[in-house]
Image: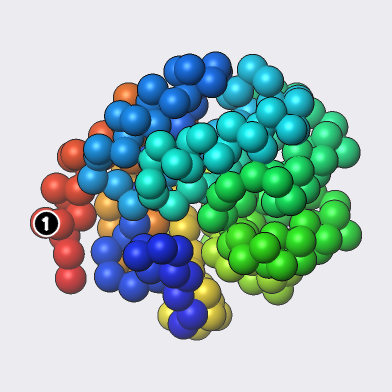
């Protein structure tokens, strides 16, 4: 199993790494939140740029990424979560990739998040551009309505791996406890039998909360914790999450 190392953080070994979302809409609020998050016991920060009110001006996003990275002094993941996968803002595919290519060329970041079901050729081009700048890529998929069956979850994770992701991520919504077990079993099977790079998996909502803290057992290499506002249902506060991960450490 390959690991992914950014600064002093190695994803894919030891405890699952804690990722905290940055969700503010203005530059001033983002920098204030970054100052606060910098002091928290987390490993990586995710700037969810779909919340940023000037996200459709790629040069502003790229410039601000330098200020945020400097304030955080932690690894920075930048994500535009599309509206169809639970994000804040409808955006054309063309604009989505324009923003990412501006960030890759002129921004300051360690990882980017791309969605699996974007056009294949554009994904391929963006991954290649990111890797030229030593930016790692998370390929991801989110289902806020249901939990696909185990084979479909495995298929999506394997597609991400085949397309050259450094980290493969899936998040699904459970309707019952059996759905949570489906996600955990798919994670275990992928990790033990197919994965050659880190996985991030989660079952969302209160029902799926167990999946956010059991990654070291089943094979998920990172989890998301809240510093205030959660970016997805079921996120636990950073301080509580760290305590639980320490308690469950293998």
- Residue highlighted by disc 1: 247
Give the percent coordinates (x, y) of residue 40.
25, 39
The one of 82 and 34 positioned closer to us in this rendering: 34
* Residue 63 in the figure: left or right of residue 235: right
Residue furthest to the left: 247
The one of 106 and 150 positioned closer to us in this rendering: 106
Compared with residue 135, is residue 234 higher up or lower down, i.e. above or below?
above
Indicate the secondary structure of the residue bearing disc 1. helix
Give the percent coordinates (x, y) of residue 167.
55, 64
Which residue is located at x 47 percent, y 70 percent?
Answer: 4
Which residue is located at x 64 percent, y 34 percent?
Answer: 63
Q: Can residue 232 be seen in this view?
A: no
Give the percent coordinates (x, y) of residue 89.
69, 23
Which residue is located at x 59 percent, y 32 percent?
Answer: 64
Which residue is located at x 31 percent, y 38 percent?
Answer: 38
Q: Is residue 48 visible?
A: yes
Give the percent coordinates (x, y) of residue 137.
62, 60
* Residue 241 in the figure: left or right of residue 106: left
User: Where is residue 12, by image quadrant?
Assistant: bottom left
């Amino acid at each position: 199993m390959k690991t992914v190392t950014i600064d002093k953080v190695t994803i894919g070994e030891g405890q699952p790494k804690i990722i905290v979302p940055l969700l503010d809409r203005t530059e001033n609020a983002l920098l204030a939140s970054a100052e606060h998050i910098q002091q928290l016991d987390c490993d990586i920060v995710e700037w969810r740029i779909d919340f940023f009110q000037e996200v459709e001006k790629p040069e502003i996003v790229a410039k601000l990424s330098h200020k945020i990275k400097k304030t955080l002094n932690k690894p920075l993941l930048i994500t535009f979560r599309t509206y169809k996968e639970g994000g804040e803002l409808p955006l054309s595919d063309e604009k989505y990739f324009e923003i990412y290519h501006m960030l890759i060329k002129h921004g300051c970041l360690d990882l980017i998040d791309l969605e699996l079901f974007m056009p294949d050729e554009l994904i391929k081009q963006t991954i290649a551009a990111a890797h030229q700048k030593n930016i790692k890529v998370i390929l991801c998929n989110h289902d806020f309505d249901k939990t696909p069956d185990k084979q479909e979850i495995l298929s999506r994770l394997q597609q991400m791996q085949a397309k050259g992701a450094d980290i493969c991520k899936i998040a699904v919504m459970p309707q019952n406890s059996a759905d949570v077990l489906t996600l955990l079993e798919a994670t275990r099977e992928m990790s033990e039998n197919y994965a050659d790079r880190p996985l991030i998996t989660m079952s969302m909502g209160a029902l799926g909360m167990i999946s956010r803290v059991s990654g070291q057992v089943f094979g998920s290499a990172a989890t998301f914790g809240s510093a205030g506002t959660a970016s997805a249902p079921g996120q636990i506060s950073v301080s509580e999450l760290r305590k639980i991960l320490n308690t469950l450490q293998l």
